[in-house]
Amino acid sequence: MTDTQGVQDFEGLKALVTGGASGIGRATADLLAARGAQVAVLDLAPSSVDKPLLGYLADVTDDASVRSAVAAAVADLGGLDVLINNAGIGAQGTVEDNDDAQWHRVLDVNVLGMVRTARATLPHLRESAHAAIVNTCSIAATAGLPQRALYSASKGAVLSLTLAMAADHVREGIRVNCVNPGTVDTPWVGRLLDAAPDPDAERAALEARQPTGRLVSAAEVAGAIAYLASPLSGATTGTALAVDGGMQGLRLRPVGQ
Ligand SMILES: NC(=O)c1ccc[n+]([C@@H]2O[C@H](COP(=O)([O-])OP(=O)(O)OC[C@H]3O[C@@H](n4cnc5c(N)ncnc54)[C@H](O)[C@@H]3O)[C@@H](O)[C@H]2O)c1
């Protein structure tokens, strides 16, 4: 299988994508496979994954579940070169709105989930000549967004974790980077819009927040993740790549002014 440009930079490489059954993770798994990788997806809902992707049931909040799914995937793939830490969940509200159980839950999935998969995969990544980890972070790590206190704290931790891991593993030949998407048109955002009092107005507000005037696509985030994971980016480690329609870096004047 080839992508539209016929780039096969992942030929012979083996990749694992958490949360790869939906949205950004699914688009990433599909793109890596199209560019030549053998790809394993770890997810709560692996049955929605079909060939050439391999699906494995795993809950990133459960260390035993992660370890056994990683062991099965690495055995089936015959090694591992690329880890995409992407599984994550959202939370809404100010710092007053989420109780301790919600804080523990979101940090457990979004931060410790990445720690567990990294711990389980690092011994295999050390064996690779092209080892790379890409974490799915968020613009919420670098910009203050209203009603996202818990979610932002989790993604801020992911950004710092990415830098610390990049430092720890650079001399082992393992690169670690993250992507910071803006609002991406995935099933997750679809669920948020469905829950809004006026979904059309909510979508328009989210689109207007991005200088490009539209939501980011899952394929665009997958492209950035593939860029960071590719052997072609062998000198890039410890970076956060914004994929946000200019939301973090640009300051536009209102339309017509
Ligand atoms: N959609 C956005 O606007 C947006 C923006 C910035 C960052 N992100 C990040 O992108 C990542 C993916 O988001 P998405 O929009 O594609 O969401 P999504 O809900 O479409 O997909 C998330 C996937 O993760 C899986 N998952 C959730 N909890 C899990 C667990 N405990 N163990 C294993 N798998 C689990 C789900 O089953 C699902 O397949 C998340 O880390 C999210 O924080 C999303």
Image: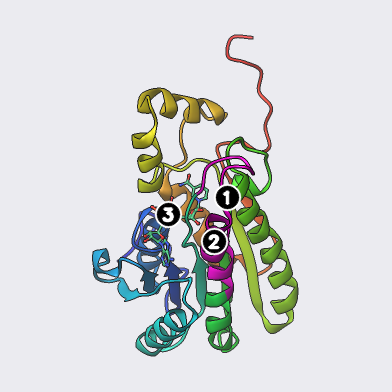
Spot occupied by residue 205 in the image (x, y as percentages of width and height): 49, 25
Q: Earlier in the sequence, mark 2 or mark 3?
A: 3
**Residue 244 belongs to the span the image colors magenta:** no
Quarter of image, ligand 1 = bottom left
Q: Is residue 115 left or right of residue 18?
A: right
Residue type (three-letter) at the residue carrying disc 3 = Ile
| Quadrant assignment, res 51 | bottom left
Residue type (three-letter) at the residue carrying disc 2 = Asn
Alpha carbon separation for disc pair 2 and 3: 15 Å
**Residue that appears at 38% across and 83% down:** 73
Spot occupied by residue 118 in the image (x, y as percentages of width and height): 57, 76
Q: Quadrant of the C terminus?
A: top right
Front label number (1 vs 3): 1
Residue 73 can be seen in this image? yes
Q: Judge: label 3 CB < 8 Å from ligand 1.
A: yes
- Disc 1 designates what residue? 151
Spot occupied by residue 161 in the image (x, y as percentages of width and height): 68, 65
Is 34 situated above or below 155?
below
Name the foreground residue: 206 vs 179.
206
- Disc 3 designates what residue? 24
**Residue that appears at 33% across and 36% down:** 194
**Residue 108 belongs to the span the image colors magenta:** yes
Alpha carbon separation for disc pair 1 and 3: 17 Å
**Residue that appears at 37% across and 87% down:** 72
> Magenta stretch?
91-115
Q: Which mark is residue 110?
A: 2
Q: Judge: label 1 CB < 8 Å from ligand 1.
A: yes
Q: Judge: label 2 CB < 8 Å from ligand 1.
A: yes
Q: Earlier in the sequence, mark 1 or mark 3?
A: 3
User: Looking at the image, do the residues carrying marks 1 and 2 touch, with CB atoms under 8 Å apart?
Assistant: yes
Q: Is residue 200 left or right of residue 135?
A: left
Alpha carbon separation for disc pair 1 and 2: 9 Å
